[in-house]
Amino acid sequence: MTNWMGDAGFLVTAKSKIRRHNPEGDLLFINGVVKEKRVEGTRHLVTIEQEARNQDGELSVLGSAVIDLPSRR
């Protein structure tokens, strides 16, 4: 999340649910989707949902976050 949001963003909340153990040598592929964009006062908030799957396509981790991003205006 922090790489995606950059130095100007602020991580408001982050949650994760580990669904399976990942032994050494597993590869994890993480995908994320922007689920919501909203403005609350001066804050520009984005809700992201992520999932991590191993090399066999098995779900490993579910995650979500709310990020405060700078306005583009």
Image (cartoon, helix red, strand yellow):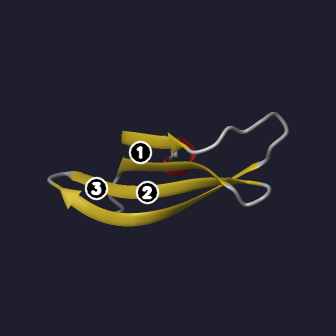
Residue projecting furthest to the front: 20
Q: Residue at x 79, y 58 (%)?
A: 56
For the residues labelled 1 and 3, the Cα–Cα distance comes to: 10 Å
Q: What label sits on residue 29 in the rendered view? A: none
Image spot of residue 4 (x, y percent)? 54, 51
Task: Give the class, few, some or many, for how many residues have Cα within 10 Å of label 1's Cα (few <14, many ≥20).
Answer: some
Residue kind at label 2, given as amino acid type: Ile
Q: Quadrant of the C terminus?
A: bottom left
Image spot of residue 32 (x, y percent)? 54, 60
Task: Give the class, few, some or many, for how many residues have Cα within 10 Å of label 2's Cα (few <14, many ≥20).
Answer: some
Image spot of residue 25 (x, y percent)? 85, 39
Which tag is nearer the camera, tag 2 or tag 3?
2
Residue on which the image places disc 2: 48
Quadrant assignment, res 15: top left
Q: Secondary structure at mark 2?
A: strand
Residue kind at label 3, given as amino acid type: His
Residue on which the image places disc 3: 44
Q: Nearer the viewer, residue 61 or 37?
A: 61
Q: Nearer the viewer, residue 14 or 46?
A: 14
As drawn, is 47 to the left or to the right of 40? right
As drawn, is 14 to the left or to the right of 6? left
Image spot of residue 13 (x, y percent)? 35, 40
Residue on which the image places disc 1: 9
Residue kind at label 1, given as amino acid type: Gly
Q: Secondary structure at mark 3?
A: strand
